[in-house]
Amino acid sequence: MEKLSLIILAIAIIVSISFAIQKHSEVLHDTLNISLVDTPKKILILPLNKGVKKHYLDSAISYLKHHFPDVEVILGQGIKIPKSCHNGRRYRADSVLNFLDKIKPDSVYRVIGITSDDISITRTLKQNGKLVTYPDRGIIGYGRKPGGVCLVSSYRISKNIYSFAKVVSHEFMHTVGVGHCNHDKCIMQDGKGSGKPLIESTHINESCLKKANLGLSGNSKKLLVLNMKLKK
């Protein structure tokens, strides 16, 4: 009888401890959720040299906020691009990204540099069935996948304000791990040296947006799995 009482007491203690651990986990989970809500990831828009015209800037910020409502978009003070990033004709986008990496504050999640100056990279494209390397190819945007910074120029976009906004989101999505896609009219299509696909794009495909949100959540493992599934 005494042995049975001890067993019952032990079971009661185990159940009590398990209940306490579960309640503690629930409280901790709720606290973490509140913390995530209260501290959204900050996206710093950084004007470079003269920056871009206000209506370009407003359109880009509005497009970002619409598609990524859980991030905080902030506008930084304008800053000069170092002369060492200029090759005599244009600013080298890869050099500008290295510069932005060095000055990126730890308090922000991503930095998007915007400029009205011409930018370029060395790029290899397929022309008439042959690969051709252009050592100084002018571009409208550049971002590492993934990476902490990206760069967008309005120089080649002419007066198409909406296209500038789409390029900003396109490059930002690269930084969170989203690659190019083959979805019709999606802003994440690869222009392959032409701005036409981007100009004609109308939206962000649902799967690309899902990948971006996985990247934002920090779930790189799920993002990798999704990337592999979409490639099949």
Image: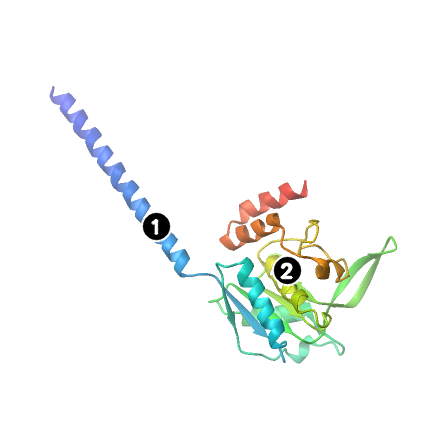
- Please tell me which residue lies in front, 192 or 63: 63
Q: Residues within 10 Å of mark 1 (few under 14, many from 20)?
A: few
* Real-space CA distance between mark 1 and mark 2, rounded to the nearest whole angstrom: 33 Å
In the displayed structure, does residue 155 sit left or right of residue 132?
Answer: left
Which residue is rendered at x = 52% and y = 55% of the image?
216
Instruction: Say which quadrant the C terminus sits in.
Output: top right
Q: Residues within 10 Å of mark 2 (few under 14, many from 20)?
A: many
Residue 34 in percent (x, y) is at 37, 55
Which residue is rendered at x = 56% and y = 70% of the image?
45
Mark 2 element type: helix
Which residue is rendered at x = 14% and y = 24% of the image?
5
Q: How is the image coloured?
A: rainbow
> Which mark sits nearer the N-terminus, 1 or 2?
1
**Three-letter code for the amino acid on which mark 2 is drawn:** His
Residue projecting furthest to the left:
2
In the picture, the disc for residue 30 is: 1
In the picture, the disc for residue 18 is: none
Residue 195 in percent (x, y) is at 75, 62
Residue projecting furthest to the top:
1
In the displayed structure, does residue 103 sit left or right of residue 231?
Answer: left
Residue 215 in percent (x, y) is at 54, 53
In the picture, the disc for residue 170 is: 2
**Three-letter code for the amino acid on which mark 1 is drawn:** Asp
In the displayed structure, does residue 134 sit left or right of residue 155?
Answer: right
Mark 1 element type: helix
Residue 146 in percent (x, y) is at 60, 57
Quarter residue 4 falls in? top left
Circle count: 2
Instruction: Say which quadrant the N terminus sits in.
Output: top left
Question: In this picture, is 129 found above or below 52?
Answer: above
- Please tell me which residue lies in front, 202 or 91: 202
Whether label 1 touches label 2, CB < 8 Å: no
